[in-house]
Amino acid sequence: MSSKRKRGLAIAGGVIAGYAVATVIALSRGYKFGPNVPVRCRAGHLFTTVWIPGASVKALRLGPWRVQWCPVGRHVTVVTLLKDADLTQDEREFAAAHHDPPVP
């Protein structure tokens, strides 16, 4: 195996390990991942979206934030992941009733 290939595999392994560590830390702090995760846009709107660490199909990832469509305000914005524990029951219900569009 060439040294370029080994270096590339080492970098890829480091990136994967970094995402794994970040995911474990986020889970330990009360964040959840999956298909119906509550998020808040910069304008304060609540909705649910698909949030999978290290992957995004309908959003642009920017570290802990994502740029995507807000179905409540009908605009493109930066969204942040929320903890269920930080939301009231009414906020959870509102977010669950407003899901972003499915993957085209």
Image (cartoon, rainbow, N blue to C red):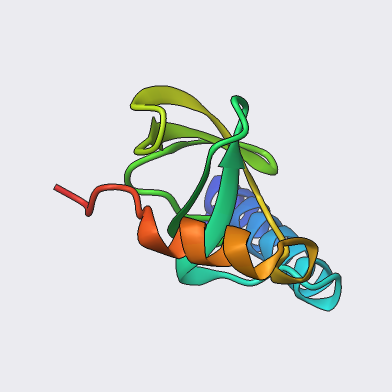
90 in relation to 32, above or below: above
Which residue corresponds to the image point at 75% horizontal and 74% vertical from the top-left?
Answer: 27
Which residue corresponds to the image point at 64% horizontal and 72% vertical from the top-left?
Answer: 32
Which residue is most to the left?
Answer: 104
User: Residue 14, position in %: x, y?
Assistant: 71, 58
Query: Which is more toward the observer, 88 or 28?
Result: 88
Q: Is residue 103 left or right of residue 43?
A: left
15 in relation to 30, above or below: above
Q: Is residue 2 left or right of residue 68?
A: right
User: Residue 18, position in %: x, y?
Assistant: 74, 59
Specify whether residue 96 is in view.
Answer: yes
Query: Which is more toward the observer, 18 or 53?
Result: 53
27 in relation to 52, above or below: below
User: Residue 71, position in %: x, y?
Assistant: 34, 38
60 in relation to 47, above or below: above
Residue 88 placement: quadrant: bottom right
Query: Which is more toward the observer, 6 or 71?
Result: 71
Specify whether residue 9 is in view.
Answer: no
Query: Which is more toward the observer, 88 or 6?
Result: 88
User: Residue 38, position in %: x, y?
Assistant: 56, 59
Residue 50 placement: quadrant: bottom left
Which residue corresponds to the image point at 66% horizontal and 55% vertical from the top-left?
Answer: 15
Which residue corresponds to the image point at 64% horizontal and 63% vertical from the top-left?
Answer: 13
